Amino acid sequence: MDTKRRKVIDGFPISGGLVLGKTRVILPGDKDIVEVAIPAYRCQAEIDALDDAVQRTISDLRKMYDSAGEKSGTPVAKIFEAQLLIASDYEFLKQVKDQILARRRNAGYIYNRLVRSHTDQLKRSHDRYMRQMAEDIEAVAGRVLSKLTGHEDIERKLPANTIVVGRTFAPGDVVSYRQRRAAGFLIAQGGGDSHMALISRSFMLPVVSVKEEWKTIPDESRIIVDGTTGKVIVNPNDDDWALYQKKKRKLGPNVVTRLKKLVQFPPLSADGKPINLAANISIPGPMDDALAERNIPIGLFRTEFIYLSEGRFPDEDTQYDYYWSIAQKFAKSTVVLRTFDIGYDKISEDTDWPEENNPALGWRGIRAMLEMGPVFKTQLKAILRASKLGNIKIMLPMISELAELEKARRYIAQAKLSLRRKGIPFDEKIEVGIMVEVPSAALIADALAPKVDFMSIGTNDLTQYTMAADRMNRKVGDLYSPYHPAVLQLIHNTVQACRKSGKPISICGEVAGDTLALPLFVGMGVSSLSMTPSRLLDLCRATKRVDTTIVKHLVAPIMSSATLQSVIHKLESYKVEIEKKNPKYKGLPL
């Protein structure tokens, strides 16, 4: 194999970010521990060695638990809390010790044999939670066995911008490699809802799944990893390197540092009008502190992280603790908590979720929650309890018809009544809104708007449902664009319905953070744009060039466009002109 040959891999994005550096390939360790017969007098020494290895593993995990709690918050820390419970499982360790004595075999062999007998069954389960438990058990066992056999990694610092490549990495590996200055990961196994993915996103480390292609990536080779698109370039040429270095410079310092540079928030337009911007959050992490310090509102807080980190729907008190910590942190701004938007692709089988060929068009979001009354009501009560500061809002996902909204409203009323009877305080005037991400909701926005306190357009799903184009399918990538006239018509219809009813309307898909769309959305009268935090600084800068008295005239020409190409051309022409020191609007599509 030519180790210097340029190679492009279209991987699957797991955690966003861009890094240019060199690879460190980690080959999977062989845990097939040799069986050794031992005399009876050696059994106690083996048991002592096992106890020592377990105690050192527990010490490592406690340090990781503390580190994760400080840097990423409770959800990530709970992953290590679960591993601590596994490592200190008295009954399992007793089985190991009993077999060491009964079979007179070395501790490593007995421990590994019993671990495999447990995990083999769990791996075959259809229950995602059980499969995740198998991964956690193997992660703990790997540490114990490394200490038993004396094959522990010497944790030397890695060179700056090292991308670690391997089949899979446990949550503890991510923490460990991050402390050693790893800048990103390429993996073969593990999806976007794995514990490894959650921790990587909380630490803002780019991760791409390249499946079995990881075996073809040479050690210590130059590489470019785009965790947002999933594109990986092995042995990039000088043009590749220069292009991505330019992209990296354009992105600037890390997001936290960039947010601290915000001088004024919300930013003002060219004619002195405030342009409301907000942030989307998928999992608590170091980003939260920077957003809270700047009093930046959270336009979309995805609550699925609780299910994914716990592996099950947590009880009311557990959820309350999460939501209350969020409410306190953002006490000086507002947080929109979206209720669970989970489908078959993310669920554990223990909830009797029906298997579906196309989960995106199936039983997910509000559809599922309305039929899982106890789960939905538990979440609503937890959110309501956390709303007592008056800065929390509730947002319902995947609403497709008025009946769903009305039924959800009844659940909210029941949750409120339950809390009142117990004398538990909550915000009686808490606002309830909906996500508009299904074309049917956009088409009946006139009927929905009067029934809610606000609306938020989820352009990612709205685009894929409107264009019948899976956003993860590169074969139909040309069709997937929020700038397509059909998608823009649905957005415009929803905005007009909200303005007619006097209700705030926000956009929270990826296009909300695109400076190309900014003049159009401001011109339409969108109340707020909510985006990934990395886009906030660019949008704040772009607002200074937007004149609200002029961009409203941009809407009609754009909405009269019949093709995607026409829309893009008009918006780009406008953007080029307004970026000049003395823009001239004559001849532009106004």
Image: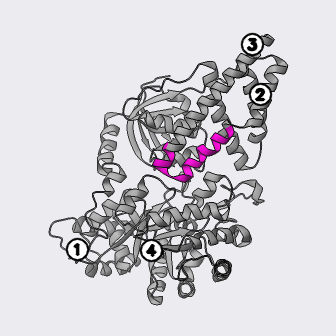
- Label 3 sits on a secondary structure element that is helix
On the rendered image, what quadrant is the C terminus found in?
A: bottom left
Q: Which marked residue is nearer to the observer: mark 1 or mark 3? A: 3
**Marks 3 and 2, the one that precedes in the sequence:** 3
Crowdedness of circle 3 by 10 Å Cα count: few (<14), some, many (20+)?
some
Q: Which residue is mark 3?
A: 42
What's the magenta bit mostly, secondary-structure-wise? helix
User: In the rendered structure, which disc, 3 or 4, sits on the residue that comes first in sequence?
Assistant: 3
> Is 308 contained in the magenta span?
no
Whether residue 167 is visible to the viewer of this picture, yes or no, is: no
Labelled pair 3, 2 in contact (Cβ < 8 Å): no
- Tell me the amino acid under the disc marked 4: Ser
**Residues in magenta?**
67-86
Quickly name the residue at label 1.
270
Mark-to-mark CA distance, 3 and 2 = 15 Å
Q: Is tag 1's residue or tag 3's residue first in the polypeptide sequence?
A: 3
Helix, strand, or loop for circle 2? Answer: helix
Name the residue that disc number 4 marks.
Answer: 506
Q: CA distance from mark 1 to mark 3?
A: 81 Å
Sooner in the amino-acid sequence: mark 1 or mark 4? 1
> Residue at position x 48%, y 85% from top?
497
- Residue hosting label 2: 96
Instruction: Specify which label sits upstream in the sequence, 4 or 2.
Output: 2
Per the model, the C-alpha gap separating discs 1 and 4 is 21 Å
Q: Quadrant of residue 319?
A: bottom right
Position of 121 with respect to 292 (left or right) is right
Query: Residue 505: x, y in percent?
Result: 45, 78
| x, y percent for residue 109 | 74, 21
Q: Residue furthest left?
A: 582
